[in-house]
Amino acid sequence: MTTAHDLAARFGPALDTRPETLHEAAQDFGHLVRAEPLGVLRPRSAAEIAALLEFAGPRGIPVSVRGGGHSMYGQGQAGGGIVLDLRALNRVGPVADGQVTVQAGALWREVLAATLPHGRTPPVLTDYLGAGVGGVLSAGGLGGAGHRHGLVADQVLELEVVTGAGEHRVCSPDRDPELFHCVLAGLGQCAVLVAVTLRLVPAPTRIRRYCLYYADLTRYLTDQRRLAEEQRFAYLEGQARPAGAQGWQYMIEAVAPHAGTYPPDDATLLDGLAHDPAAVETEDLEHGEFARRVDTDEEVLRATGEWHHPHPWLNLLLPQDSAESVVRAVLADPAFADLRDTGLVLLYPLLSDRLRAPLFRRPPGRVLYLLALLRTGEPGSPEKAAAMVAANRAAYELARAQGAVAYPVNALPMTDADWRDHYGSAWPALADAKRRHDPHLVLARGHGMRF
Ligand SMILES: Cc1cc2nc3c(=O)[nH]c(=O)nc-3n(C[C@H](O)[C@H](O)[C@H](O)COP(=O)(O)OP(=O)(O)OC[C@H]3O[C@@H](n4cnc5c(N)ncnc54)[C@H](O)[C@@H]3O)c2cc1C
């Protein structure tokens, strides 16, 4: 059995084994599970990542990658193994010819900070820009421009990776496409992302943001689908919000680019929709200010301490046919009553034919809805946290029975059978790729997938 001593002998002082480092690497944004590694390595090159994997593989030492550290349920932890902290691999740029190459340990806010001065942006961004480039691409990456452009991962032109076998490779849709397609939305199972070349599009200077309110879920979902299909807006998301003692209201959040001297035509954009016309809210913002909007929430939650509380989050992708019944069931479930006080419920549409990464699982049908149940637990109450995770599991089973799949960035225990069900017909190809690229099965065990 490999010990910390063997690792120290091989990697010397580069292996950080200080108690405070191991304590930090044993947790994540979810604050629900802990697994302490033997050490943390902070590579500065692909060669250093390859050297670790060549050593760890034959010895069966688990290796997990940590970028932004926003896993919910130990996905980025490596109990008894090594955490590769990629934050030092965070070079971005230069921006040229409508693209940018970024190292995978960069955060999305660092990417945007480099592209906006050139008037460019990645076509799709997640709501929160503090997550890591590698972390988002390994999940897929959903955002308000998804109904037009697909996943964040669909904007990747080329990847530089180190496979679980320690091979340093470059791949793209034309060059080694099999490796390319098992890395994007592949939950880090086959390779460590080192650098990524992203497609960029012109960024608007200003945007107009509309909030449209609905008392009725059926009308909300109908309008959401219509707006997605007609692509009236550049960005389309929405929320369920508590209203009254037990009720809910729904809010479409839609954004149109704004050229300053030519503001959007509100009447045309909102024509024929069933929202409450008396409650329309609009605001004009700089594009960058809108893209960074969650940074302000983060600052507030850090100041109150809630940023460090448990986050038993659940993200589900619902088929159009059963979206309404699943949303109604979950919002009426007493086990999710705390959504009314400490939660945020996102509910917005995507179009399946825009989501191209083959390993990104989605429910059947052309239109699907992201339902994100984002709750905050109490610190120091493991029983309550466990009950919230159990409620996630029950909601997942309820939704899955109606055709839903998980967007796998959740606080959700998944069994071997769940993972096989999740990947469905793609499972044999993923399992085959895993055995070829990570033959000792050491990478990304924190997701709980077994091959
Ligand atoms: C406040 C908040 C808002 C969010 N909003 C959105 C949203 O709008 N849309 C959305 O899609 N997601 C959203 N997420 C989820 C987020 O995208 C995922 O949790 C993502 O995986 C976090 O990446 P990270 O690098 O920060 O986390 P980490 O914990 O560092 O990484 C997560 C996992 O990604 C994999 N990984 C990370 N880096 C690499 C790499 N270089 N190579 C291979 N695998 C790697 C590993 O398996 C790791 O376990 C949000 C999360 C938070 C906390």
Image: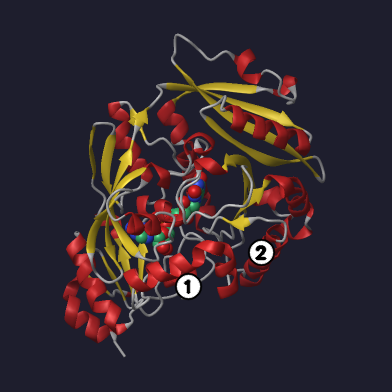
Does 286 sit left or right of 160 as displayed?
right
Cα separation between marks 1 and 2: 17 Å
Colouring of the image: secondary structure
Q: Position of residue 449 (x, y in %)?
A: 49, 71
Q: Eyeballing the image, is 308 above or below 356?
A: below
Q: Which residue is mark 2?
A: 388
Which structural element holds mark 1?
loop
Q: Is residue 412 visible?
A: no
Q: Position of residue 413 (x, y in %)?
A: 58, 69
Q: Which residue is mark 1?
A: 34
Q: Return the residue nearer the eye: 172 or 34.
A: 172
Q: Is residue 50 visible?
A: yes
Earlier along the polypeptide chain: callout 1 or callout 2?
Answer: 1
Q: Return the residue nearer the eye: 251 or 292.
A: 251
Residue at x-position 29% and y-position 78%: 57
Position of the N terminus, as image quadrant, is bottom left
Residue at x-position 54% and y-position 63%: 425
Badge number at residue 258: none
Amino acid type of the residue tagged 2 in the rendering: Met
Q: Is mark 2 within 8 Å of ligand 1?
A: no
Q: Eyeballing the image, is 347 above or below 410?
A: above
Q: Return the residue nearer the eye: 288 or 61.
A: 61
Residue at x-position 48% and y-position 75%: 450
Q: Return the residue found at the far bottom.
A: 1
Does 274 sit left or right of 444 as displayed?
right
Quarter for ligand 1? bottom left
